[in-house]
Amino acid sequence: MRKITKKCWQCHRTFRVLEDEQYDHVCTNGCYENNGLSGSIDACGEEVTNGDEVIIHDGEIILYENAARYLIEVLGAERKNAGE
């Protein structure tokens, strides 16, 4: 399996993970452990826990799995099916 390089949004250091596991890993440099995000509430109202992958946008914390919900509910994006 091929390894890819990811860059941590917080500490800006790079780390390598297997390509098919790229979304399953947080920074291997340990910066997520004490970054103050654990226990926070994301922009969609869900609790952030240790190890959760998050997106930061304009100072808002968004759980990765809530990204589409954030685009639609908070930013006003429109959801459509292709071909409609």
Image: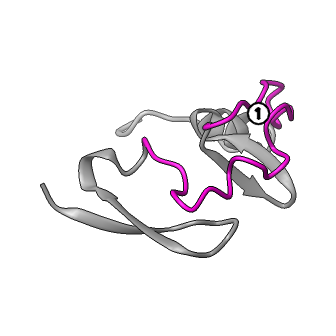
Lateral position of residue 7 relative to residue 76, left or right: left
Which secondary structure is most common in the magenta stretch?
loop
On-image quarter of the C terminus: top left
Residue lying farthest to the top in this orientation: 46
Q: Residue 34: within the magenta?
A: yes
Residue at 58%, 66% in the rendered image: 8
Q: How many C-alpha atoms fall within 10 Å of the one at disc 1: few (<14), some, or many (≥20)?
A: few
Vertical placement of 57 versus 84: above or below? below
Q: Give the range drawn in magenta.
A: 24-51
- Give the farthest residue toward the left: 1
Q: In which quarter of the image is residue 10?
A: bottom right
Residue 60 position, x and y percent, is 84, 50
Q: Is residue 53 magenta?
A: no
Residue 84, above or below 56? above
Q: In which quarter of the image is the N terminus?
A: bottom left
Q: Which residue is drawn at 30% across and 66% down?
A: 4
Q: What residue type is labelled 1?
A: Glu
Q: Total of numbered circles in the picture?
A: 1
Describe the colour scheme in one phrase. one colour
Q: In this view, does 25 lie above or below 16?
A: above
- Specify whether residue 10 is in view: yes
Residue for point 79% across, 37% down: 38
Q: Which quadrant would residue 74 be assigned to in this image?
A: top right
Where's residue 66, x and y in %? 64, 33
**Residue located at (78% from left, 24% from top):** 46
Q: Quadrant of residue 78?
A: top right
* Residue under pointer 1: 73
Tell whether 55 sits left or right of 45: left
Q: Where is residue 5 in the image (x, y as percent from the top left)?
A: 37, 70
Q: Who is closer to the viewer here, 58 or 12?
A: 12
- Label 1 sits on a secondary structure element that is helix
Q: Position of residue 18 (x, y in %)?
A: 26, 54
